Image (spheres, coloured by chain):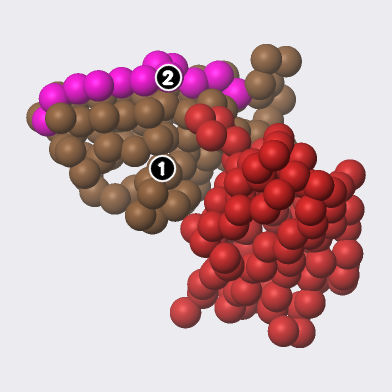
Chain colours: A brown, B red
Amino acid sequence: DAGVIQSPRHEVTEMGQEVTLRCKPISGHDYLFWYRQTMMRGLELLIYFNNNVPIDDSGMPEDRFSAKMPNASFSTLKIQPSEPRDSAVYFCASSWGRFGNEQFFGPGTRLTVL
Amino acid sequence: KNQVEQSPQSLIILEGKNCTLQCNYTVSPFSNLRWYKQDTGRGPVSLTIMTFSENTKSNGRYTATLDADTKQSSLHITASQLSDSASYICVVSGGGNLFFGTGTRLTVIP
């Protein structure tokens, strides 16, 4: 397996634009997680899915953020409209089981909102 | 309040030397504690996971300890190598939630 795949690796956009980040989890994993990482706040869990169903989205900062998982092999994190304070590295991770088993992280998407 | 605090924030050591990173937590109830290594520009990679009943766990030159009574964990790196330069993040799971430390940035110099 190629591991968790994220695209794009880098995204630069202007304030107010819509941004969509994509993730392909490891085949067979039943949990998918979206994280945000900044220098100030470190890693933050935004939302996670179990078998494509959103379980906990309490970490999503605002209504501007939304995530979907239409099938077991694909998930998106959308920000609309984007703001400069959304600039961060966004990671997707997947695992077999929730928090007890190892999560495998993707390489991340570095988002810069001008 | 559930918190995870790591120290030091950053550390510079000479190649070949040992070092210890600290993680103190107030998370309750406690399920497990995991140490991650994150190389620059990459996602975190799990080094060890420890449950309540485990005191020590090793992964090569990395040894993690856990004292569940004092709610402290340490990550000891033996005979450091240049490739150990990375951020090390402590993550505690409990009560159906994950709590993250802000990490220790380790730099190993020749």
Q: Position of residue A56 (x, y in %)?
A: 46, 51
Local packing at callout 2 (Cα closer than 10 Å; few below 14, some 14-19, many 20+) is some
Residue B100 at what x, y percent from top left? 53, 59
**Image height check: is B38 above or below B5?**
above
* Residue that label 2 marks: A9
* Label 2 secondary element: loop
The mark total stands at 2
Residues behind callouts 1 and 2 on a single chain:
yes
Residue at point 76% right, 78% down? B68
Q: In this rendered view, identify the residue nearer to me: A50 or B19.
A: B19
Question: Residue at the spot x=54%, y=57% of the render?
Answer: B10
Circle 1/circle 2 CB separation < 8 Å: no
The residue furthest left is A16
Q: Which residue is mark 1?
A: A36
Q: Position of residue B90 (x, y in %)?
A: 62, 58
Chain on which label 2 sits? A
**In the image as oriented, which residue stretches furthest toward the bottom?**
B69
Per the model, the C-alpha gap separating discs 1 and 2 is 14 Å
State the extent of the magenta-drawn residues as a range.
Answer: A4-15
Which amino acid type is marked by label 2? Arg
Q: Residues within 10 Å of mark 1 (few under 14, many from 20)?
A: many
| Residue that appears at 21% across and 44% down | A85
Residue in view at x 64 percent, y 68 percent: B23
Q: Nearer the viewer, residue A103 or B100?
A: B100
Task: Please determine whether, in this image, residue A32 is positioned above or below residue B87.
Answer: above
Looking at the image, residue A10 sits to the left or right of residue B16; the answer is left
**A39 left or right of B15?**
left
